[in-house]
Amino acid sequence: MKKVIIIDDSEMILNDVSRKLQEAGFKVITINKGLGASQLILSEEPDLIILDVKMPALSGDELLSILKDTMDPPPPVILFSDLEASELQQISSKYNTPYLTKSDRALLVNKVRELVG
């Protein structure tokens, strides 16, 4: 069973996305803040990370930079945010990682399957 970590400061998003991925057969671990997420990622060794970009204290952009610097290679990441698609695309290009807006949540399970099977 493939393992996915969801990092988002919205409990509603964590619950909704977690439920959808579990129903699709994935093992899901959630964390509601960027702080502490890198330690969780290192200990759990997920197959994929779904990462909110806008979070207090440590943004998804900052966390992704830390992961790129400390893991070789880091697990695949899907940026997942309510930012405008153009803003997400800039961050996505910077880190060469896919993105989805939260309004495209229905596409998330297929995107996860595409990246990890």
Image: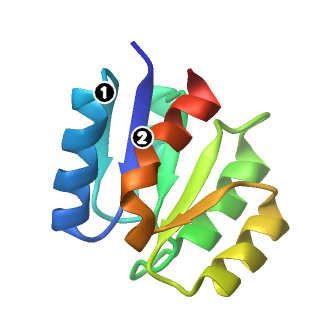
Label annotation for residue 109: 2
Q: Nearer the viewer, residue 108 or 53?
A: 108
Label annotation for residue 24: 1
Judged left or right of residue 11, residue 49 is right
State the quadrant of the C terminus: top right
Residue 87 picture location, percent across and down: 67, 85
Identify the residue at image location x=46%, y=80%. 54
Q: Nearer the viewer, residue 77 or 111?
A: 111
Is 43 situated above or below 97? above
Q: Secondary structure at mark 1?
A: loop
State the quadrant of the N terminus: top left
Three-letter amino acid code at disc 2? Val
Q: Does the residue at mark 1 contact the one at mark 2 (Cβ under 8 Å)?
A: yes
Identify the residue at image location x=63%, y=71%. 61
Three-letter amino acid code at disc 1? Ala
Identify the residue at image location x=45%, y=51%. 107
Judged left or right of residue 60, residue 72 is right
Residue 91 picture location, percent across and down: 72, 74
Q: Secondary structure at mark 2?
A: helix
Residue 115 picture location, percent across and down: 63, 33
Q: Is residue 88 visible?
A: yes
Q: Nearer the viewer, residue 87 or 7?
A: 87
Q: Is residue 7 visible?
A: no
Identify the residue at image location x=82%, y=67%. 93
Number of on-image labels:
2
Residue reaching furthest top?
1
Label annotation for residue 5: none
Within 10 Å of disc 2 (Cα), the crowding (few <14, some 14-19, many 20+) is some
Q: Nearer the viewer, residue 21 or 52?
A: 21
CA separation, marks 1 and 2? Answer: 7 Å
Is 87 situated above or below 47? below
